[in-house]
């Protein structure tokens, strides 16, 4: 259960970050060219969270953990990559 909840929390943080970024750009009318790709990714992560919650509720916790961690690993790798860029190339735009 701890592994499932950890992966679910990581996915929820990704949802919060992506929706906050798109809301910020929407409300302040900032022209972002890659914004059209954020909405499908956000939809897929939300769908994945609902599917995994369904399997966790139905008692199949192993499958729910696998579903959650497939996306959580991608989020962790992406966050580490961005963090390394910030650390080693702070003037890179």
Image (cartoon, rainbow, N blue to C red):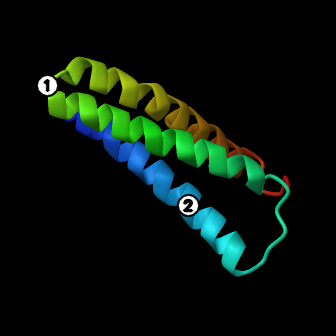
Q: Position of residue 79 (x, y in %)?
A: 57, 43
Residue 91 pos. (x, y %): 83, 57
Marks 1 & 2, CB-CB < 8 Å contact: no
Query: What's the distance in space between the residues labelled 1 and 2, CA to CA?
Result: 30 Å
Instruction: Return the residue at label 2.
Output: 19
For the point 67% across and 50% down, the residue is 38
The quadrant holding residue 65 is: top left
Residue 87 image offset from top left, x and y in percent = 67, 49
45, above or below 30, in the image: above
The quarter of the picture where the C terminus appears is: bottom right
Determine if residue 1 is in view: no
Position of the N terminus by quadrant: top left
Q: Is residue 47 left or right of residue 58?
A: right
Q: Which residue is mark 1?
A: 59
Q: Earlier in the sequence, mark 1 or mark 2?
A: 2
Specify whether residue 35 is in view: yes
């Amino acid at each position: 259960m701890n592994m499932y909840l950890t992966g679910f929390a990581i996915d929820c943080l990704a949802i919060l970050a992506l929706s906050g970024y798109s809301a910020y750009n929407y409300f302040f009318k900032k022209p972002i060219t890659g914004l059209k790709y954020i909405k499908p990714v956000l939809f897929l992560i939300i769908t994945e969270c609902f599917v995994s919650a369904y399997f966790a509720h139905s008692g199949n916790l192993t499958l729910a953990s696998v579903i959650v961690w497939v996306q959580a690993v991608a989020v962790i790798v992406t966050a580490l990559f961005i963090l390394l860029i910030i650390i080693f190339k702070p003037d890179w735009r």
